[in-house]
Amino acid sequence: MTLTREATPYPHWRFTHPTCGDSLRLVPERGGLVTGWTSGGREWLYLDEARFADPALSVRGGIPVLFPICGNLPGDRLPLPQGDTTLRQHGFARDRPWTLEPLADGQGVALTLVDDDSTRAAYPFAFALRLELRLSPGLLTLDARVSHTGPSDAPPMPFSLGFHPYFRVADPAAVKLEGFPERCFDHLSQMEVATASQWERLGAGVDLLARPLGSVVTLRDPSAGTTLQLELTAPLDRVVVWTNPPRPMVCLEPWSGPRGALLSGDGRLTLAPGESRELRCAYRVTTD
């Protein structure tokens, strides 16, 4: 059995790949959260376990799922033809219980979230979000499928999707990031800035959004002797870098659109009733 229930250090499910031995820790009832990814005998994800123990606090760690928005909206208000609703930062997927099942091919697990009365109060659409996580040696692939499951006369469903993984590093100030353009958008100052200036501030705290130069961005942690690569596929092809000192982590986040995408239209994804959209990214890790 590759999917087992474990009680420590907190109740979770563990998926272990049947051949390579890489594994995932998952807590589906807490936002479909992946709390751990072990590959090559190393834990790659950061998790603040003390904070995680209090469900009233937002999670700092693992791989939170961002849906149906990434970032926040002005006043947390989402204007729609059906009327305005309140939709908080990063949406509700990271707060809702998901279902968990092993994949038929034995290579990973599937997490599923569907609409209910609570989600429809904030986001008046019928939807299904299925996330398949597959492991192979040194590789975690995330395949998401978003479906508009409303009736044929329902309005189109706008959305954004993102992932917010926290990667463990020895020293955020010492990491090297590659594959980024010369300019990026600084969420803190709300200005376009030189990307190099942000790298100088990793140890102090950064929050930036960029369109990578290609389909891969790289995070090198020379202090730990590790390399992490994020492999991007459109439309999940914008990247947020976030550090939160003194936490020993760097977030390397693929987003389908910037903050406010559902308002501005920049990167906004839309589904007609009965339509689905697939989004993919992958993380590859190596050690020196």
Image (tube, rainbow, N blue to C red):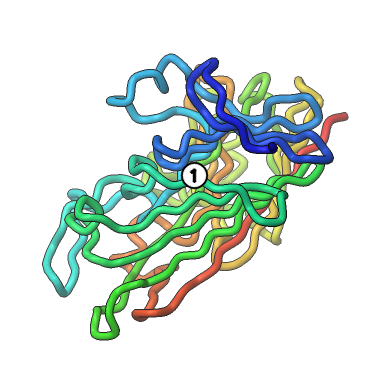
- Residue at x-position 49% and y-position 61%: 256
Q: Position of residue 230 (x, y in %)?
A: 68, 48
Which residue corresponds to mark 1? 208
Q: Element at badge 1? A: strand
Q: Nearer the viewer, residue 135 or 83?
A: 135
The picture places residue 63, in percent across and down from the top left corner, at: 52, 39
Compared to residue 72, the image places residue 60 above or below, namely: above
Quarter placement of the N terminus: top right
Q: Is residue 200 visible?
A: no
Q: Residue furthest front?
A: 1
Apparent side of residue 34 relative to residue 127 in the rendered image (left or right) = right
- Name the residue: 50% across, 42% down: 164
Q: Quadrant of residue 234?
A: bottom right
- Residue 134 rendering spot, x and y as whole percentages: 68, 50
Identify residue type, mark 1. Leu
Extreme residue in the left direction: 83
Residue nearest the viewer, comparing 286 with 9: 9
Q: Give the quadrant of the C terminus.
A: top right
From what the image shows, is residue 111 above or below residue 275? above
Q: Can you name the residue that lies furthest to the bottom here?
A: 153
